[in-house]
């Protein structure tokens, strides 16, 4: 047999599922009852055909060739670095340092095809400083680099089988030149390759050290959940357990950095000696390099001690323009710290750039109404900061929670009012209003982010993720075999539960969208996206369907024919409205500071909807 049914998951809230599993690779998948019947019918037809063609059965094959161990793993994969055998024959089959790409990075292949069509035993790796791709080049290029083997690209993407013969644990935590030289001798490679070999391990140790210290481990000791995630994403467990490196880390100028490091011949003088008298080299500190590119270090200033700025740096949302202490009369605002005092956390200069502060100050005593607006918005932002400081000083989480959404919405209103005021003001000579608006937005966003950080607590605010769904989405029923089918929501919810949704305090599972959002969606939002004639025609067509109808084309496609991609049933309009309402609720939760992000498990997806028929 190719597959066996192993379980029936009864879930009246999200939808029932048949669980099946492929025999050879133990990969599970989800089926609805009708799909199960259809699959059994196809199997019977296939067996009947095989009996009519006895000759084709002599090989004894079951019809499936997927034979691999999807649970194969290697120690240290949670840090992302391994030794792997490249598929390139020029590599001579040596085990070389490589970074395993996470399944998120490999969701689409280079050709743009969906990953599920690829073998689940293949993983994508990036070989670090490979030597086999740079032997051929011009004489002028050779003179610019350390050796001929360093001429090729510093990184090479490859796809390899996840087997013990192709993958080994990466053995180094630090750079010992003596150990590297010893291991290099057993590779049988030319001596001229060693500088490239050293660079590959420089990168490997640096990336491994960064992942170990700065990237959270999700499945480091949890093979069961990692296996479940691999099944859900149709990938190998190694691709699930590998870390997700920030793009800023992957895009650093490593060529430039490595060219500044000493050549192996220089290590006697450039490297330090450890207690064991073996030559050691310091590890490239990736985190330090990234932080040096972020404010305030990138402006040549020492780091300002501010937990909000620290959080911003960690999440790649650092302040983008320089700030300084404000000279505007902040002491006139009740409760706001004077910027001349030691604590500058609440000074206006911690939020606004030099450019904007100068604009506020130059117009603070101006009686010209066309330019006095700049001083007005300066006082607005000061009042906002003072209010935030007052709320943040409350020790009771309940008080913070009550004021959080109101304050955040006030931030948005002040931001909008400020933009309108800037539009009415006369900009100084040589300065575009667009520039002023951009800086104003940045200032308001910094206040907003500071509020999110300071008003958050265990189950509300920063670091909270939510999953929103609603059983009314099951009312949208398509034809058997359609890609967009009811099984998608229960499968998604099961995956979310495996990740901790509804079980962990920082991962909420919300199973009902309130009627207030339904009314807002149907009365205000949907009419803004579609013409009234479109909505009326769709409603009347759905209302005329039999109760048990499913898979009926609801709209025409671009060629005027019944659209196979717009099939539905009596509950389709309600399901679509729920999808919009869920998105509104999710937006309200994020903007209102209840959580950082929200995933809406709803259907139909809506990407075939038009403004009019």
Image (cartoon, rainbow, N blue to C red):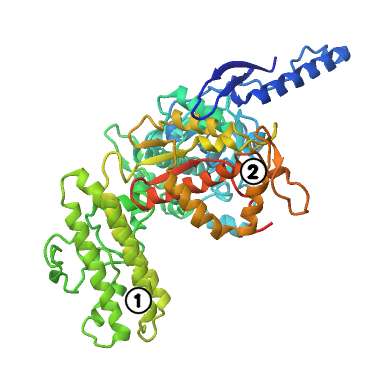
User: Is there any visible trace of residue 132 in the rendered image?
Assistant: no
Which x, y percent locates residue 31? 62, 25
**Callout 1: few (<14), some (14-19), or many (20+) C-alpha neighbours within 10 Å?**
some
Residue at point 26%, 77% (across, down): 375
Q: What element carries label 1?
A: helix
Outermost residue, left side: 341
The residue under label 2 is: 543
Percent from the top left, x then y, of residue 84?
55, 32
Rendered-image quadrant of the C terminus:
bottom right
Question: In the rendered image of this protein, does residue 295 appear above or below residue 154?
Answer: below
- Residue 518 horizontal side relative to residue 335, left or right: right
Q: In which quarter of the image is residue 369?
A: bottom left
**Residue at the spot 62% in from the left edge and 21% down from the top edge:** 68
Q: Residue 327 carries which label?
A: none
Q: Count how many numbered circles sit on residues in the image.
A: 2
Residue 331 lies, with reference to residue 18, above or below; the image says below
**Residue depicted at 73% across the width and 46% down the height:** 563
Tell me the SS state at disc 2. helix
Q: Position of residue 382 (x, y in %)?
A: 22, 67
Neighbor class of circle 2 (other Cα within 10 Å; few <14, some 14-19, many 20+) is some
Labels 1 and 2: the sequence-earlier one: 1
Q: Are marks 1 and 2 in contact (CB under 8 Å)?
A: no
Q: Mark 1 = which residue?
A: 421
Q: In the drawing, does residue 29 fall left or right of residue 406?
A: right
Q: How far apart are marks 1 and 2 (CA)?
A: 49 Å
Where residue 197 appears, as percent x and y from the top left, is 50, 40
């Amino acid at each position: 047999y190719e597959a066996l049914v192993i379980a029936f998951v009864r879930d009246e809230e999200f939808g029932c599922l048949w669980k099946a599993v492929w025999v050879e690779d133990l990969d599970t998948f989800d089926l609805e009852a009708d799909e199960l019947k259809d699959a059994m019918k196809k199997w019977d037809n296939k067996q009947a055909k095989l009996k009519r063609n006895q000759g084709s059965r002599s090989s004894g094959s079951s019809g499936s060739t997927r034979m691999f161990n999807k649970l194969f793993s290697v120690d240290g994969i949670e840090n992302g670095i391994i030794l792997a055998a490249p598929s390139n024959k020029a590599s001579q089959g040596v085990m070389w340092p490589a970074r395993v790409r996470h399944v998120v990075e490999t969701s689409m292949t280079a050709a743009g095809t969906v990953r599920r069509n690829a073998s689940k035993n293949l993983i994508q790796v990036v070989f670090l400083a490979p030597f086999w791709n740079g032997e051929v080049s011009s004489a002028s290029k050779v003179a610019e680099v350390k050796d001929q083997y360093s001429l090729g690209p510093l990184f090479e993407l490859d796809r390899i089988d996840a087997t013990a013969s192709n993958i080994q644990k990466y053995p180094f935590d630090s750079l010992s030149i003596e150990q590297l030289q010893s291991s290099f001798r057993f590779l049988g490679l030319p001596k001229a390759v060693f500088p490239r070999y050293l660079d590959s391990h420089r990168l490997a140790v640096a990336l491994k050290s960064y992942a170990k210290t700065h990237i959270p481990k999700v499945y480091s000791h949890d093979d069961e959940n990692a296996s479940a995630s691999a099944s859900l994403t149709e990938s190998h467990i190694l691709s699930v357990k590998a870390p997700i490196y920030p793009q800023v880390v992957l895009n650093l100028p490593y060529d430039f950095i490595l060219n500044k490091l000493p050549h192996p011949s220089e290590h006697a003088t450039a490297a330090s000696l450890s207690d064991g008298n073996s030559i050691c080299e310091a590890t490239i500190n990736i985190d330090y390099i990234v932080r040096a590119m972020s404010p305030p270090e990138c402006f040549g200033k020492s780091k300002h001690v501010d937990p909000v700025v620290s959080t911003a740096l960690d999440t790649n949302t650092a302040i983008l323009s320089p700030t300084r202490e404000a000279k505007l009369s902040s002491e006139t605002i009740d409760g706001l710290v004077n910027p001349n005092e030691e604590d500058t956390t609440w000074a206006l200069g911690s939020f606004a750039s030099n450019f904007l502060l100068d604009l506020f100050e130059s117009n603070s005593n101006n009686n010209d109404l066309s330019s006095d607006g700049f001083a007005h918005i300066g006082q607005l932002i000061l009042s906002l900061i003072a209010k935030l400081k007052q709320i943040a000083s409350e020790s009771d989480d309940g008080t913070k929670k009550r004021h959080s959404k109101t304050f955040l919405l006030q931030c948005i209103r002040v931001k909008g009012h400020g933009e309108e005021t800037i539009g009415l003001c006369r900009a100084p000579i040589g300065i575009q209003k667009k520039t002023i608006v951009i800086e104003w937005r940045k200032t308001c966003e910094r206040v907003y982010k500071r509020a999110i950080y300071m008003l958050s607590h265990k189950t509300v605010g920063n670091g909270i993720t939510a999953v929103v769904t609603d059983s009314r989405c099951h009312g949208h029923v398509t034809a058997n075999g359609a890609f967009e089918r009811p099984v998608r929501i229960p499968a998604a919810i099961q995956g979310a539960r495996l990740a901790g949704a509804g079980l962990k305090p920082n991962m909420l599972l919300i199973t009902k969208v309130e009627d207030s959002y339904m009314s807002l969606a149907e009365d205000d939002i949907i009419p803004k996206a579609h013409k009234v004639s479109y909505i009326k025609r769709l409603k009347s067509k759905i209302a005329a369907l039999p109760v048990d109808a499913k898979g009926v084309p609801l709209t025409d496609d671009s060629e005027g024919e019944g659209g196979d991609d717009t099939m539905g049933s009596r509950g389709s309009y309600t399901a679509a409205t729920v999808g919009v309402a869920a998105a509104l609720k999710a937006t309200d939760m994020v903007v209102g500071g209840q959580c950082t992000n929200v995933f809406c498990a709803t259907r139909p997806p809506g990407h075939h909807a038009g403004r009019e028929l």
